[in-house]
Amino acid sequence: MIISEYDELRSKTGHGPQDTRVYDTGVTSLDGKIYYALSDDNELALLVPLRNAIEMDTLKLSDAIRLKPKVFEEEGKWLLLVCAYAELEKVFCHFVNALLNYVEPHKSAFGSINTVFQEFVHLLEPKKEKATISEVAGLIGELLFLHELSKKDSSAINLWVGPSGGQHDFVGESADIEVKASTRIGKTSVTISSLEQLTIFLDRNLYLLHYSLELHPNGDLSVERLVDMIVNEGVALSQLEPELQKIGCNDYRSEEWNLDKFNYVKASCYQVKDQFPRIATDLLIDGKVLPGVSNASYDIDLTMADGYITDVDQAILELL
Protein backbone atom coordinates (compact mmCIF):
# COMPACT_ATOMS: atom_id res chain seq x y z
CA MET A 1 0.00 0.00 0.00
CA ILE A 2 1.43 3.39 -0.95
CA ILE A 3 1.26 6.59 1.06
CA SER A 4 -1.62 8.04 -1.00
CA GLU A 5 -3.84 5.11 -0.04
CA TYR A 6 -3.07 5.73 3.62
CA ASP A 7 -4.10 9.35 3.04
CA GLU A 8 -7.40 8.07 1.67
CA LEU A 9 -7.82 5.90 4.76
CA ARG A 10 -7.33 8.99 6.94
CA SER A 11 -10.43 10.54 5.41
CA LYS A 12 -12.65 7.57 6.20
CA THR A 13 -14.54 6.64 9.34
CA GLY A 14 -13.78 3.43 11.19
CA HIS A 15 -15.02 0.15 9.77
CA GLY A 16 -12.78 -2.39 11.46
CA PRO A 17 -12.72 -3.98 14.93
CA GLN A 18 -14.49 -1.58 17.32
CA ASP A 19 -14.64 1.06 14.56
CA THR A 20 -10.90 1.33 14.09
CA ARG A 21 -10.06 2.78 10.70
CA VAL A 22 -8.75 -0.15 8.70
CA TYR A 23 -8.48 -1.36 5.12
CA ASP A 24 -8.25 -5.02 4.20
CA THR A 25 -4.80 -5.81 2.82
CA GLY A 26 -6.06 -8.96 1.11
CA VAL A 27 -3.47 -10.95 3.03
CA THR A 28 -4.44 -13.63 5.56
CA SER A 29 -2.09 -15.37 7.96
CA LEU A 30 -2.71 -18.43 10.09
CA ASP A 31 -4.18 -16.12 12.77
CA GLY A 32 -6.52 -14.19 10.47
CA LYS A 33 -6.76 -11.16 8.21
CA ILE A 34 -4.17 -8.37 8.32
CA TYR A 35 -5.34 -4.77 7.97
CA TYR A 36 -3.82 -1.45 7.02
CA ALA A 37 -4.81 0.86 9.88
CA LEU A 38 -4.43 4.23 11.55
CA SER A 39 -3.61 4.80 15.19
CA ASP A 40 -5.75 6.96 17.47
CA ASP A 41 -3.37 9.81 16.61
CA ASN A 42 -3.78 9.32 12.84
CA GLU A 43 -0.40 7.62 12.42
CA LEU A 44 0.19 4.94 9.77
CA ALA A 45 -0.15 1.46 11.22
CA LEU A 46 -0.64 -2.21 10.48
CA LEU A 47 -3.12 -4.32 12.46
CA VAL A 48 -1.92 -7.90 12.84
CA PRO A 49 -3.91 -10.73 14.53
CA LEU A 50 -2.22 -12.64 17.34
CA ARG A 51 -2.99 -15.97 18.91
CA ASN A 52 -0.90 -15.23 21.98
CA ALA A 53 -0.36 -11.68 23.27
CA ILE A 54 2.63 -12.89 25.30
CA GLU A 55 4.50 -13.27 22.02
CA MET A 56 4.81 -9.49 21.80
CA ASP A 57 7.33 -9.46 24.64
CA THR A 58 9.81 -11.26 22.41
CA LEU A 59 9.51 -8.76 19.55
CA LYS A 60 12.17 -6.05 19.53
CA LEU A 61 11.98 -3.45 16.79
CA SER A 62 13.08 0.21 17.00
CA ASP A 63 11.86 3.54 18.29
CA ALA A 64 10.46 4.14 14.80
CA ILE A 65 7.78 1.45 15.20
CA ARG A 66 5.66 1.44 18.33
CA LEU A 67 3.97 -1.81 19.32
CA LYS A 68 0.48 -1.55 20.80
CA PRO A 69 -1.41 -4.66 21.92
CA LYS A 70 -5.13 -4.52 21.14
CA VAL A 71 -7.86 -6.73 22.54
CA PHE A 72 -11.32 -6.63 20.97
CA GLU A 73 -14.06 -8.54 22.77
CA GLU A 74 -15.35 -10.38 19.71
CA GLU A 75 -12.28 -10.14 17.51
CA GLY A 76 -9.61 -11.44 19.88
CA LYS A 77 -6.03 -10.23 20.29
CA TRP A 78 -4.19 -7.98 17.86
CA LEU A 79 -0.91 -6.16 17.55
CA LEU A 80 -0.86 -2.63 16.12
CA LEU A 81 2.46 -1.67 14.51
CA VAL A 82 2.56 2.14 14.45
CA CYS A 83 4.91 4.37 12.46
CA ALA A 84 6.14 6.75 15.18
CA TYR A 85 7.73 9.37 12.91
CA ALA A 86 5.99 11.17 10.05
CA GLU A 87 9.32 11.55 8.25
CA LEU A 88 9.53 7.74 7.91
CA GLU A 89 6.06 7.10 6.52
CA LYS A 90 7.30 6.21 3.03
CA VAL A 91 9.83 3.74 4.40
CA PHE A 92 7.14 2.31 6.69
CA CYS A 93 4.95 1.69 3.63
CA HIS A 94 7.78 -0.23 1.96
CA PHE A 95 8.24 -2.24 5.17
CA VAL A 96 4.52 -3.07 5.26
CA ASN A 97 4.48 -4.16 1.62
CA ALA A 98 7.53 -6.36 2.17
CA LEU A 99 5.94 -7.91 5.23
CA LEU A 100 2.68 -8.66 3.42
CA ASN A 101 4.60 -10.33 0.60
CA TYR A 102 6.45 -12.48 3.14
CA VAL A 103 3.43 -13.64 5.15
CA GLU A 104 2.16 -17.15 4.37
CA PRO A 105 -1.43 -18.27 5.01
CA HIS A 106 -0.38 -21.37 6.98
CA LYS A 107 1.97 -19.46 9.32
CA SER A 108 1.52 -16.83 12.01
CA ALA A 109 2.35 -13.30 10.79
CA PHE A 110 4.08 -12.68 14.09
CA GLY A 111 7.11 -14.72 13.11
CA SER A 112 7.51 -12.73 9.90
CA ILE A 113 7.59 -9.27 11.47
CA ASN A 114 11.05 -9.42 12.99
CA THR A 115 12.51 -11.21 9.97
CA VAL A 116 11.33 -8.56 7.52
CA PHE A 117 12.20 -5.71 9.88
CA GLN A 118 15.88 -6.68 9.80
CA GLU A 119 15.95 -5.67 6.12
CA PHE A 120 14.71 -2.19 7.05
CA VAL A 121 16.45 -1.66 10.39
CA HIS A 122 18.81 1.02 9.08
CA LEU A 123 16.11 2.79 7.08
CA LEU A 124 13.58 2.82 9.91
CA GLU A 125 15.65 5.06 12.12
CA PRO A 126 14.84 8.78 12.48
CA LYS A 127 17.67 11.19 11.88
CA LYS A 128 18.93 12.22 15.29
CA GLU A 129 21.10 15.16 16.10
CA LYS A 130 23.47 14.74 18.99
CA ALA A 131 22.72 17.06 21.87
CA THR A 132 25.43 19.70 22.30
CA ILE A 133 27.84 19.55 25.22
CA SER A 134 26.26 22.66 26.72
CA GLU A 135 22.76 21.17 26.42
CA VAL A 136 23.84 17.94 28.12
CA ALA A 137 25.79 19.79 30.82
CA GLY A 138 22.81 22.04 31.50
CA LEU A 139 20.55 19.03 31.96
CA ILE A 140 23.18 17.31 34.12
CA GLY A 141 23.23 20.36 36.38
CA GLU A 142 19.46 20.40 36.82
CA LEU A 143 19.34 16.63 37.40
CA LEU A 144 22.14 16.89 39.98
CA PHE A 145 20.11 19.39 41.95
CA LEU A 146 16.88 17.43 41.50
CA HIS A 147 18.67 14.39 42.90
CA GLU A 148 19.72 16.37 45.97
CA LEU A 149 16.14 17.53 46.48
CA SER A 150 14.75 14.04 45.92
CA LYS A 151 16.91 12.63 48.70
CA LYS A 152 14.99 14.91 51.06
CA ASP A 153 11.55 14.74 49.44
CA SER A 154 10.58 12.55 46.47
CA SER A 155 7.77 14.96 45.58
CA ALA A 156 10.36 17.68 44.87
CA ILE A 157 10.07 16.93 41.16
CA ASN A 158 6.97 19.13 41.25
CA LEU A 159 9.28 22.08 41.95
CA TRP A 160 11.17 21.54 38.68
CA VAL A 161 9.31 23.95 36.41
CA GLY A 162 12.11 24.98 34.04
CA PRO A 163 11.15 22.39 31.40
CA SER A 164 7.61 23.78 31.35
CA GLY A 165 8.82 27.29 30.63
CA GLY A 166 9.02 28.62 34.18
CA GLN A 167 11.05 31.78 34.69
CA HIS A 168 13.30 29.90 37.10
CA ASP A 169 14.37 26.25 37.03
CA PHE A 170 13.00 25.40 40.48
CA VAL A 171 10.18 27.23 42.25
CA GLY A 172 9.37 26.40 45.87
CA GLU A 173 7.60 27.67 48.97
CA SER A 174 9.54 30.88 49.51
CA ALA A 175 12.48 30.69 47.12
CA ASP A 176 13.40 30.11 43.50
CA ILE A 177 16.62 28.54 42.22
CA GLU A 178 18.26 28.98 38.84
CA VAL A 179 20.81 26.27 37.94
CA LYS A 180 23.84 26.81 35.69
CA ALA A 181 26.64 24.45 34.70
CA SER A 182 30.10 25.09 33.28
CA THR A 183 32.23 22.45 31.58
CA ARG A 184 35.61 24.15 31.72
CA ILE A 185 37.48 23.97 34.99
CA GLY A 186 38.14 27.44 36.28
CA LYS A 187 35.51 29.10 34.11
CA THR A 188 33.88 31.81 36.19
CA SER A 189 31.29 33.23 33.79
CA VAL A 190 27.79 31.96 33.09
CA THR A 191 25.29 32.99 30.45
CA ILE A 192 21.92 34.36 31.50
CA SER A 193 19.51 33.72 28.65
CA SER A 194 16.79 36.27 29.40
CA LEU A 195 15.99 39.38 31.41
CA GLU A 196 13.56 37.34 33.51
CA GLN A 197 16.01 34.63 34.55
CA LEU A 198 17.48 36.62 37.46
CA THR A 199 14.40 38.70 38.22
CA ILE A 200 13.58 38.74 41.93
CA PHE A 201 9.93 38.51 42.86
CA LEU A 202 8.48 40.29 45.87
CA ASP A 203 8.74 38.40 49.18
CA ARG A 204 10.78 35.60 47.62
CA ASN A 205 14.48 34.81 47.65
CA LEU A 206 16.32 33.93 44.46
CA TYR A 207 19.43 31.74 44.32
CA LEU A 208 21.86 30.94 41.53
CA LEU A 209 23.43 27.48 41.82
CA HIS A 210 26.53 26.99 39.68
CA TYR A 211 27.97 23.52 39.01
CA SER A 212 31.52 23.14 37.73
CA LEU A 213 31.80 19.96 35.69
CA GLU A 214 34.73 18.27 33.98
CA LEU A 215 34.07 16.66 30.62
CA HIS A 216 35.57 13.16 30.75
CA PRO A 217 34.98 10.07 28.53
CA ASN A 218 34.70 7.86 31.62
CA GLY A 219 33.00 10.43 33.85
CA ASP A 220 30.72 9.42 36.70
CA LEU A 221 27.85 11.63 35.61
CA SER A 222 25.59 10.94 32.64
CA VAL A 223 21.94 11.72 31.96
CA GLU A 224 21.00 8.05 32.19
CA ARG A 225 22.81 7.48 35.48
CA LEU A 226 21.33 10.58 37.12
CA VAL A 227 17.81 9.66 36.04
CA ASP A 228 18.29 6.20 37.54
CA MET A 229 19.61 7.76 40.77
CA ILE A 230 16.60 10.06 41.00
CA VAL A 231 14.20 7.18 40.41
CA ASN A 232 15.99 5.22 43.15
CA GLU A 233 15.11 8.04 45.54
CA GLY A 234 11.42 7.36 44.96
CA VAL A 235 10.60 9.68 42.05
CA ALA A 236 8.30 7.97 39.55
CA LEU A 237 9.81 7.60 36.09
CA SER A 238 6.35 8.38 34.71
CA GLN A 239 6.69 11.85 36.27
CA LEU A 240 10.28 12.41 35.24
CA GLU A 241 10.17 11.34 31.59
CA PRO A 242 7.58 13.93 30.45
CA GLU A 243 9.73 16.73 31.89
CA LEU A 244 12.79 15.42 30.06
CA GLN A 245 10.84 15.23 26.83
CA LYS A 246 9.82 18.88 27.15
CA ILE A 247 13.46 19.89 26.80
CA GLY A 248 14.10 17.55 23.88
CA CYS A 249 15.41 14.50 25.73
CA ASN A 250 12.91 12.02 24.34
CA ASP A 251 14.91 8.98 25.43
CA TYR A 252 17.12 9.53 28.46
CA ARG A 253 19.02 6.31 27.69
CA SER A 254 19.78 7.30 24.09
CA GLU A 255 23.32 7.63 22.81
CA GLU A 256 22.91 11.25 21.76
CA TRP A 257 22.22 12.30 25.37
CA ASN A 258 24.85 10.03 26.94
CA LEU A 259 27.92 10.32 24.72
CA ASP A 260 29.16 13.19 26.88
CA LYS A 261 29.95 12.27 30.47
CA PHE A 262 31.22 14.46 33.26
CA ASN A 263 32.90 14.44 36.64
CA TYR A 264 31.65 16.65 39.42
CA VAL A 265 34.13 19.37 40.44
CA LYS A 266 32.26 21.69 42.77
CA ALA A 267 29.05 23.61 43.34
CA SER A 268 28.68 27.24 44.39
CA CYS A 269 25.44 28.83 45.53
CA TYR A 270 24.76 32.57 45.37
CA GLN A 271 21.87 34.59 46.72
CA VAL A 272 20.78 37.04 44.06
CA LYS A 273 20.10 40.35 45.83
CA ASP A 274 21.32 43.93 46.30
CA GLN A 275 24.21 44.60 43.91
CA PHE A 276 24.55 41.07 42.55
CA PRO A 277 25.74 41.50 38.93
CA ARG A 278 22.66 41.12 36.74
CA ILE A 279 20.30 42.73 34.28
CA ALA A 280 16.67 41.99 35.09
CA THR A 281 13.20 43.40 34.66
CA ASP A 282 12.88 44.35 38.33
CA LEU A 283 15.78 46.75 37.82
CA LEU A 284 14.15 48.52 34.87
CA ILE A 285 11.84 51.50 35.03
CA ASP A 286 8.30 50.18 35.41
CA GLY A 287 9.79 46.69 35.02
CA LYS A 288 9.62 46.90 31.22
CA VAL A 289 12.09 47.18 28.36
CA LEU A 290 11.58 49.70 25.60
CA PRO A 291 9.27 48.69 22.72
CA GLY A 292 11.06 46.66 20.07
CA VAL A 293 13.31 44.73 22.45
CA SER A 294 12.08 41.14 22.43
CA ASN A 295 14.90 39.29 24.18
CA ALA A 296 18.37 39.73 25.65
CA SER A 297 21.11 37.47 27.01
CA TYR A 298 24.31 38.36 28.81
CA ASP A 299 27.25 36.88 30.69
CA ILE A 300 28.10 37.50 34.31
CA ASP A 301 31.48 37.00 35.98
CA LEU A 302 30.88 35.09 39.19
CA THR A 303 34.18 36.28 40.68
CA MET A 304 32.36 39.60 41.09
CA ALA A 305 29.69 37.86 43.16
CA ASP A 306 31.85 36.23 45.85
CA GLY A 307 30.15 38.36 48.47
CA TYR A 308 26.85 36.67 47.74
CA ILE A 309 27.98 33.06 48.21
CA THR A 310 25.69 31.23 50.60
CA ASP A 311 24.99 27.72 51.90
CA VAL A 312 23.07 25.64 49.37
CA ASP A 313 21.37 23.80 52.26
CA GLN A 314 19.75 27.07 53.30
CA ALA A 315 18.44 27.54 49.76
CA ILE A 316 17.08 24.01 49.75
CA LEU A 317 15.39 24.58 53.10
CA GLU A 318 13.58 27.64 51.73
CA LEU A 319 12.69 25.81 48.53
CA LEU A 320 11.10 22.85 50.28
Image: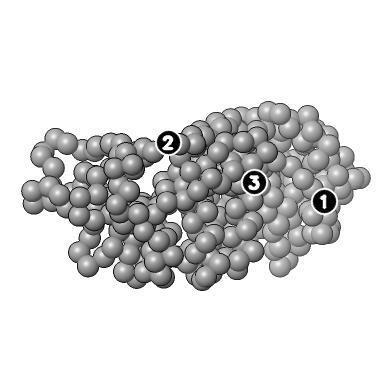
Residue displayed at 60% across by 33% down: 126
Locate residue 205: give its quadrant: bottom left
Estimate the spatial distance between the alpha carbons at disc 2 and disc 3, rounded to whole Å: 20 Å
Which of the two labelled residues, at mark 2 and mark 3, occupies the earlier sequence position?
2
Type of amino acid at the residue the image marks with label 2: Lys
Q: CB under 8 Å between callouts 2 and 1?
A: no
Residue displayed at 52% across by 42% down: 213
Which residue of the protein is positioned furthest toward the right in this rendering?
Answer: 106
Q: Nearer the viewer, residue 75 or 145?
A: 145
Task: Where is residue 263? Give x, y as percent.
Answer: 59, 43
Q: Is residue 211 visible?
A: yes
Name the residue tied to disc 3: 220
205 left or right of 152 in image: left
Type of amino acid at the residue the image marks with label 3: Asp
The circle on residue 187 is: 2
Q: Nearer the viewer, residue 163 or 83?
A: 163
Name the residue tied to disc 1: 58
Helix, strand or loop under label 2: loop
Type of amino acid at the residue the image marks with label 1: Thr
Q: Residues within 10 Å of mark 1 (few under 14, many from 20)?
A: few
Which residue of the protein is positioned furthest toward the left in this rendering?
Answer: 285
Q: Nearer the viewer, residue 306 or 81?
A: 306
124 left or right of 319 in image: right
Q: Is residue 247 visible?
A: no
Circle 2 or circle 3, nearest the eye: 2
Task: Where is residue 150? Give x, y as percent.
Answer: 53, 65
